[in-house]
Image (cartoon, rainbow, N blue to C red):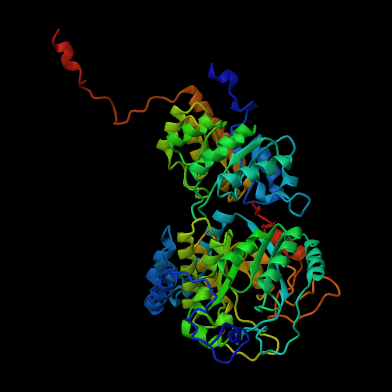
Amino acid sequence: MKTLNNRLVLGEHEFTSRFILGSGKYSLNLIKAAVENAGAQMITLALRRANPGGEENILDFIPQGVTLLPNTSGARTAEEAVKIARFSRELGCGDFVKIEVIRDTKYLFPDNYETVRATEILASEGFVVMPYMQPDLNVARDLASAGAACVMPLAAPIGSNRGLQAREFIKILIDEIDLPVIVDAGIGCPSQACEAMEMGAAAVMANTAIATAGDIPLMAEAFKNAIEAGRSAYLAGLGRVLENGASASSPLTGFLSAAD
Amino acid sequence: MDVKSILNGSSEWPDYMDYLPNMDLIRENIMLRVLASVESLEFDRYTPDDVRRALGARECTVYDFAALLSQAAVPFLEEVAQRARKETRARFGNSVTLFTPLYIANYCVNQCVYCGFNRSNRIKRARLESDELEREMRAIAASGLEEILILTGESPRMSNVAYISNACAIARKYFRVVGVEVYPMNIREYTALHSCGVDFVTVFQETYNMQRYGELHPGGRKRIFPYRFHAQERALMGGVRGVGFAVLLGLSDFRADAFATGLHALMIQKKYPHAEISFSCPRLRPIPGGSFTVSRDVSEAELFQVMCAYRIFMPSANITISSRESARFRDNVVGIAATKISAGVDVGVGRHAKNVAKGEEQFEIDDGRSVSEICEMLASRGLQPVMSEYIYV
């Protein structure tokens, strides 16, 4: 029974929530309420936003008990991502790392080649590596061989709120890769998150859609509900959809019985 | 004519389009393409329909950008602002980054007719020595800031690259983000600065109208227009992460200048996709002892139009709002178009720490609020102050 152990497994860690919340682009004093309403057990953190001991330090606003998912935003090469991940560990942010290697400031597309290289190095150093990537099957396979704990394909350009533009390619990853596929970036509203989960995504990560909502905690809650609904639908098995209207009244195989 | 006499401010200057012998030459057509585009630009031809189309388009083209900067967009300023705010929120959420500029020296060999540091201006000149830099920076860091912008005049004797590098190395001890706004340099000099912790280089072109540029810069190395134009590219080749662009609005036709600035930034972004781009939007300000008058003042509404057009054209660029502007204007443009704001600003040399005050200011500022006052203002407007969003790798 799929429902008996409905947990998200990343490395040796298990989570009951399948909603990874972002912490950027909104007021630090709303993070706690957003986490609570989202029921999130994991929250991303841009290491470059951490300001230990200083003013407006994002680390001071993340509630206890939530797993930190530090990301390497700001890295333009594998080496830079590795440096930032090590820095994160030194800072006491744990062993999870979301690899973001971006050398395009307009679309913020992840560089798949560098991401694979960084994954190899960091996985060998014992990190739980969660790579942000463009949905490409070959790259996803390489990431799996390199020791990634999951793959995180983008649904649409980050921050665009345009939804599952890469639906077909993400579906292929879900079908072919034996790792959790976490849909990251571009999800603009709860219904899109629900759709990703119905499709079989292991989890959804969202930030901008919540950060730019009118009521941030309420939108976090809406995402939580949508993600749970999508997960349940996936586990239940979606009903048959007739693509071209009703079945033909004269079956194409009718001629076979005529021969009897 | 030899280089020495040029640097010493000889009255006999080369044409402003001729490189001096020791300047890195970039064989690149970005400059010609920008200048040709500006020349062919006919702002009068843009109609309200062009502006409506620009506002409705998903991606802002170069033509849309020109339409948004044109006179035809003036009656649509509210719609332009709405679109700008949407772009700002999508890219930056409610984050606004704080920084402060620090003037470390005001010696200058240049003769920019509109500038307080002009070599022929009789002002008190000074530069901060290492111990004074430490004291100044410690005082600034105590306010909670994590980003500093180092500025100097141009003087091969008093503020050479070694002097600036030393200042930046000291700055790295106190701040996470170090940027410079100093004279244009050669590639290996930018590499030297980068190795001292500098990752952001801003160079104001002042105006992209070449002829006007020649008139406004009768002497000093700054006179050489193309060397200045290619500074951002050399800085990126030297290894820095981000580059800033600006014109001094009011020196020439501000609409054409803003258009050229955006186009220049776009072409650099296309050639160096990893580069972080930023814009500054200074208007001319009165200067100590100065009598320079502009051909036409740029109004607040016009400045606002320029900032919004930059935002819509390049949504991911940082836009800095200067302390030259009033508190009322600054408070309102953050969150709509601007994403960076200076705080605790003093544009004189050495006035953050007690007993350091040495040199006079480059221009007059309007908004002298402290860091905590700016943070309070941002919070009251639902915005999140950010001290640093950067990591040196």
Residue B390 on image: x %, y %: 65, 54
Query: Can see residue A181?
Result: no
Q: Residue at x 47, y 41 (%)?
A: A134
In terms of depth relative to the viewer, which is nearer, B2 or B218? B2
In terms of depth relative to the viewer, which is nearer, B259 or B245? B245
The answer to whether residue B54 is left or right of residue A229 is left
Q: Residue furthest left?
A: A259
In the image, residue A195 sits, relative to residue B324, either above or below, namely above
Q: Residue at x 45, y 65 (%)?
A: B267
In the image, residue B212 sits, relative to residue A216, either above or below, namely below
In the image, residue A236 sits, relative to residue B187, either above or below, namely above
Residue A251 on image: x %, y %: 21, 20
Residue B260 on image: x %, y %: 47, 73
Residue B206 on image: x %, y %: 55, 78
Q: Quadrant of residue B323?
A: bottom right
Q: Quadrant of residue A71?
A: top right
Q: Residue at x 29, y 31 (%)?
A: A244
